[in-house]
Each structure stands twice: as C-alpha cells, then as structure tokens.
Image (cartoon, rainbow, N blue to C red):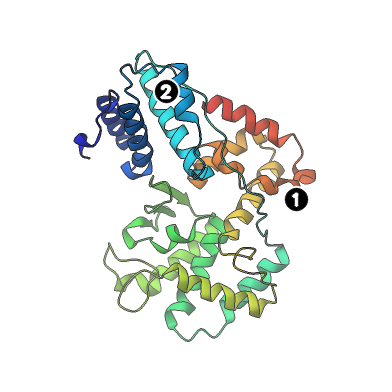
Amino acid sequence: MNRKEFHSIFAPHIVRYIEYKEANGFKEDSYHLALKKFDRFASEEGVSDIKLTEEQIYVWKTRSDNESSNSYYKRINRSRDLLEFLFRQGEDVTVFSAVKYPLSNFIPHIYTEEEISRYFHVVDTHGWRDWRDRLQLPVIFRLLCCCGTRATETLNIRKCDVDLEKGIIKLVKTKNNKPRYIVLDDTMAALMCSYASKFFFQLHDEDYIFQRIGGCAMSQNALYKKHRIILDEAGIQFDGELNGPRVHDWRHTFCVNSFQKMKGCGTPLYTALPLLVRYLGHESVLCTEKYIHLYTKIQNNIGGDFSEIVSLLAKEES
C-alpha cells in the first residue's frame, strides 16, 4: 500500500484502518476506492478536524446524479466503517448513519425440485465432447447448487485450496476479496474425492482444478454456454440473459433452500440470517437482503416478519 496516496487529515487514520482490515483477512482493493474518495473529499472541502460537522456530513452523504446505487452504498458505508473504527479506538469522531443496500425489482429464478432433477440428469448424461466437461461439470454445478458459491469463486479453486481429508474448500478469489471456507457435506465430499482421484494427480498445487486446454481456468463464458445447453435439453424455459434462469440463480436457490432447512430444524431466523450472511461472504446483513426479496415466495412456509428481523440485525451491525 502506498501511504502517499492519502493527503487529508484522515490520511494516517486511513492507513491504520487499512492495516487493521488486512490483518483481519480483508484485501485492500475491497474498500480502497471508497477511502480514496473520502480522503479526496476531506482534502477538497478543507476538512481540518476528523470530527466532521453536520454540514460536511450532509455534503458527503449527498448522492450525485450520475452515481449508481451500489457505488453510493459502498462510498458511504465504507467511510462510515472507518469512522466507527476510529471511534472504537477512542478518537473524537462523529459516526453518521449507514445507508441501506440498494435493492432491485429483479426476481431471480428459484429452481424447483423437478427442475433440479432434470438439470442434473442432463449434466451427468449429456455426451460432452471434451472429456474435461464430462469429468468437471457434475462437480462444478453441484458446488453452485449445494454450496451456494459464485461461479467465479468456483472456477478459481486451485488444488492447494482443497482439503480432501477435512472436506473443506478455501475460496480465495471472492467478490469482496475476503477469503472464506465452505464445508462439504458427506455426499459432496465423496464426489470431490472421486473427482480428485481421477484428475488431481496431474496437477501442481497452484493449478486450477477446473481447467481448459493449456491449464487455464474454465471461463465464466464457457460455463454459461454449457448452462444454456443443459437448460435446453432439460426442458427448462430460458427467458433471456437478464431473466434467466441464470447460473447465478443457483446461489439464490441455495439461499431459499437453506432458510427452509434451518427453519425445519427449528433455527430462529434471527440466528439463521447472520449464519447465512457469513457463509455467503457478504459484508453485512443488508447485502444478503437482496437475496431475500424473493422471500415472499416462501414466507408462508417459514413464517415470521422477515423485514423486521433484517432491520433489527442491521441496527446491531451499525
């Protein structure tokens, strides 16, 4: 990290904060841009005290016309995290309120049990021309379906990230740049061991476990093309790239199924939601909320006032 990047009165505090975050497993580029913006704002506004005035907070929290909801969310909440860190360190700062994660009206496709059965029948029996597809696709798609991983996280798994003995996989290239672990159930662990016995002996520790010719990782585009073939052969209607069903909808389906299973085991939603947030690798309960706007589809089965629980947990985080 280049300490000379920051020039405002917050500069040494930002450096200290980044060092703290990195020590706790975060990667710098997951919040670096937002802090650069905050540092530039403090410099341009001539902020001379780390305790911001109400007027300065108002200016900083004003959203520009060309700023996306997601960029605004990151800019405000990541700078707020910095101030909260300084407050816990005993600094005299004003911690402003967080902003809610931006939700869209998009409704993802939740795969039904019948669709899941048809989909994986094709995955397992389709006459894939490349032997790699015959070997790899059943494992890749089951990781997406059964473990809720993102496609990019899955395709970037290396041999050294897989602990076959413990049934644990480390996800390194994550969306928020914070590595996390997934634990395989007995069925998934057995499938991974079977796959490893057929392919891992060819790999070095740093090699990707899902490859194309030449040893490079399978691309998202290649996976998407396989997905379209599977949907067509399984008789699952495809409504376009935006409406899907998409590869990413396996992650949404995993969320819904996880809530149903936890409710069936008697786990209170107040406990279940933070567990799912952490497992998915989201930064807060508000990030996970976008996966649960489809909650109305299953609310009768789960019960409880979900929006109230989300609001309460969000307040605790802040």
Amino acid type of the residue that numbered disc 2 sits on in the rendered structure? Glu
Distance of label 2 from label 1 (alpha carbons): 37 Å
Q: Pointer 1: what residue?
A: 297
Dots 2, 1 in contact, CB < 8 A = no
Specify the quadrant that holds the N terminus.
top left
In front here: 85 or 55?
55
105 in relation to 83, above or below? below
Amino acid type of the residue that numbered disc 1 sits on in the rendered structure? Lys
Circle 2 packing at 10 Å, graded few (<14), some (14-19), many (20+), is some
Circle 1 packing at 10 Å, graded few (<14), some (14-19), many (20+), is few
> Is any part of residue 53 visible from this angle?
yes
- State the mark number for residue 84: 2
> Is any part of residue 283 visible from this angle?
no
Classify residue 236 as left or right of residue 99: right
Identified at 37% across, 54% down, the residue is 173
Secondary structure found at label 1: helix
- Where is residue 124? Give x, y as percent: 57, 76
Identified at 65% across, 80% down, the residue is 233
